[in-house]
Structures are given as C-alpha cells and as structure tokens.
Amino acid sequence: MKNTISLFDFSKKINYKNELLAGFTVAMTMIPESLSFAILAGLSPLTGLYAAFIMGLVTAVLGGRPGMVSGGAGATIVVLIALIQSHGIEYLFTTVVLAGIFQMLVGIFKLGKFVRLIPQPVMYGFLNGLAIIIFMAQVEQFKITGTNGAVSWLQGLPLYIMGGLTALTIAVVYFFPKITKVVPASLVAIIVVFAVVLGFNIPTKTVADIAHISGNIPSFHIPQIPFSLETLQIIFPYALIMAGVGLIESLLTLSMVDEITNSKGNANKESVAQGLANMTNGFFGGMGGCAMVAQTLVNLNAGSRARLSGIIASLMILMIILFGAPVIEKIPMAALVGVMMMVAISTFQWVSIRIINKMPKSDIVVGITVALITVILHNLALAVLVGVIISALVFAWDNAKRIRAKKYTDENGVRHYEIYGPLFFGSVTTFLDKFDPINDPDEVIIDFKESRVVDMSALDALDKLSKRYKQENKTLYLRHLSEDCRKMLKNAEAVIEVNIQEDPTYKVMPEK
C-alpha cells in the first residue's frame, strides 16, 4: 500500500540540478509542439499549452514511470480534428473526458500488461516512424504563411538565416556533451542561439510568429453540450480511438524508458494517471494528450531520472503562460527546430538498420509496415495493431509448421501417435493429415505428452478424427492431456466426442 500512495521514492538520491535543468529544457521543447498541434486542429494556442501543463503535472505526480513526460501530443489531437471541425470545441472537451475514463478503466482492470505482447520489430517501426514524423514536423517550420493565407517555403536570406541558426543549434547539441554534461546540451543550444539572435539583432522566425501564449490559470468548465444518447453516439468512437492511441503511445514510451534506465515502470498505474490527466483536461480547457517520446528523450538525455523534472516542466509552462510569454515569444524557432531534429535523430533506431540483414524477413516487413503507417496516416494505434496482427499471424504460421507425430505400433498391436508441437487453429490441417483411420489397427492412442490442445479448432479436429475412426469401427484414445486440456474437453463434451485414457504413471500437476 505504501508504494501506491507514495509520490516520491526517497530511498533514491535525486540530482536536483539535473531535474531542474531538465524540466526547464523540456518546457522549452513542449511549447512549440503543443502550439503547433493546437493551431493545426483549429484550436486556441492556450488549449495546447493548458494540455501540456495539466497532462505533464498529473502524470508526473501520479504516473507509473518517473522520467517520462506527457503533454498535449499531436498523436491524440490528430484523431479528433474531424470532430472539432464538425461539432466544435465543447464536443472535444467531452470526448477527452470520456477517453480519460476509458484509460482509467484499462489501468483499474490491469490491462496495461498487454503492452508486453508488442514485439520488438513493432517497437522499432513505431519509433522509426515517430522519428520521421518529428523530423518532418520541424521541416514544416521552414515555411511561412503570407498575408493572404498562402503557405510557402522561406527563400533567400530568411532561409539562410533559419538554416544557419538550426545548424548552429545542432552543432551545440552534438558537441557540447563532449565538453561537459553538467548542463543539458539542448538548453545550452537554445540559450546560445537566443543570445546570438538578440546580440546581433538577426531578423528570424520566433515563437511569436506561431502564436501569442499569454493567458490566465485554466478554470473549471463543464462542457456545454446536450447530455443525450445521440451525443454519446457521436463522441464514443472518437473517445475510444483517442484512448487507444494515447495509451499505446504512452505504454510504448514507458517500455522505451524502462530499457534506457534499466528499471521497471508500472503500466497500469500509468494508464490510470493518463486517464485522470485527460479527464482533468476536459474540465479545464485542455485538448488532452499522452506521453511524448521526443520530450521524454530530451528529459532523459538531460539527466533526469525522477518525477521532479516533469513537475518543474509543467509549472514552468504555467509560469510562462502567466508571466513569461514576452520573453519566450522572442525565442528563435530555429533553436527549437534544431533541438527537435536532434531528438528525432536519436529517436530513430539505427540499430534496426545495422541488423536488418540478420533479422527474419517477416520482422523486417513488420518494422517497415508499422513505420510507413505511422508516417503516412499518423495513426499510431492502427500502426501498432497492424504490426501485432502481422507478427501474430507469422507466429501462428511458424508454429503450424512445427507440429509433427512420431508413429509406432506396440507389441499388443496398438498404434501410437506421439504429438510434438501445439494443436491450434493453424496446425489442425497438418495434424489431421498425419492419421490413417482406414489402415490403422482397431486401437489407436494419441499421446499429448509433448503437445497441448489450445483452442476450439483443436477440439473440433479431435472430434472429427474420433468420428473417422468410429466409422471404421475403431477406437481412438487421447493420453497425457494436461489439466487445462482436460478442462477444455470437459466443457465441450456436449458438442464433441472423444475418449480420454487415464495413465496412472503420468500425472500433470493441476493449475491452482
């Protein structure tokens, strides 16, 4: 119980300097992303910043993974753009609340563990696709919107200035850690480029060119929509998709942080925190969100390993909304673009390219497919789902080919079939082909000591086989069935007919 209610693990030493600097750096990188996606969805810039503040604070305090950063992520808002355009912002807030409820239920019923079913190639594809999205989003910052609303690429001197400042940022992020790691390289890069632009009065694109970010503390607000069955029918599918996308990205990010920090997070606790954060968003004017891979990597690279940096980042965003907007709006976009480009490069799983000639072809196909769906559709949930399905089908096919039977006839003239490999929907055809009811003797024993009866397709195959032997006036016995196999056969005895042979010399320990 103590672990459930404790917010901080005081047994672990916290590096307060790292946490403070990491929190400040994360806040700087969260602002442009939250603003960009809020504007993309046709929302007020403050809706994005409120989401960054609320998501970050609630998940940092209550989440299941210290070091992980959540905010107003594009992955979740992209799936809601159609709803916002057709029904307005009040429906968005209600949908975010409902999505939060779904996410909390996942955590309460301990379904977060199913993220373990996501194979490594899917993880590679997910992260590689996300890296490309992050990088391409930064390239978009090299465009400018004219007075007539037309969007065009920067040209001439503005392009050279933006490109040069971005290159300077990348160089600082890359080379500064070789000098010292006392201060996060990303924060140093932002300060250096900021100073250069101010010192030389260089005209370039700033945060203010995206949006003005000054505002007040978010206030409680019940969404103004009709609470009816018709409303539920409208928002339900959107809420379900948002909850799925948000949880998949959050739990995959959690797994990534587990690997980087060599520690274990709590997926169910994180699911509840994500849900609570989204519900809070819906009632306080935020657009909702989930874990942010790029900002989490910025946080970890800055040396954060505790919850403190996430709390500091969230409070910093609130302070910026209330007091710091005039300063933050002057930060050159090139500095933030350079930092995020380096994050994209570090997010990309280069190891997946190095070992591509050593990976099974099916894993290569899965990784590329997941990456392509992520990049083209921006639908992380669909990408991961397709990857898991392909991996599952490949696994089923491989196991279907592995079932085999060792055949012999004992001194009593009884025919024995010793089965190796699982009997399930994928292997039943191969299994049935191994028997010869016409030419077999009067008694046949199938030995499942090295096999398992897995599903209804397997039970149906045993029933068909039993009937084939019965038609030939021969008897088929099943031997060495495990306790769970016997239970399945017992439950299905109304629809199938098999003979189970008790073997006093072989007992399978029943499941408790």
Image (spheres, rainbow, N blue to C red):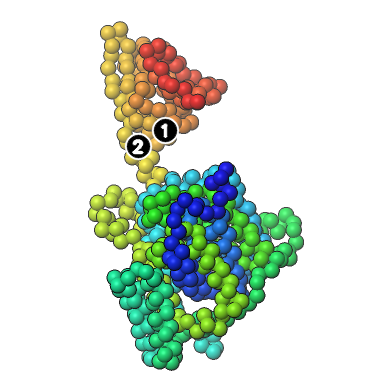
Q: Residue at x 39, y 19 (%)?
A: 480
Res 169 quadrant in image: bottom left
> Label 2: which residue?
399
Q: Residue at x 57, y 43 (%)?
A: 1
Q: Position of residue 412 (x, y in %)?
A: 30, 7
Q: Position of residue 282 (x, y in %)?
A: 65, 62
Label 2 and label 1: CA atoms lie apart by 9 Å
Q: Secondary structure at mark 1?
A: loop
Q: Is there any visible trace of residue 241 in the rendered image?
A: no
Q: Position of residue 7 (x, y in %)?
A: 55, 53
Q: Is there any visible trace of residue 274 in the rendered image?
A: yes
Q: Position of residue 248 (x, y in %)?
A: 49, 54
**Label 1 is placed on what type of residue?**
Phe
Q: Secondary structure at mark 2?
A: helix
**Label 2 is placed on what type of residue?**
Asn
Q: Residues within 10 Å of mark 1 (few under 14, many from 20)?
A: many
> Which disc, if any, is residue 424?
1
Q: Are marks 2 and 1 in contact (CB under 8 Å)?
A: yes
Q: Residue at x 45, y 53 (%)?
A: 12
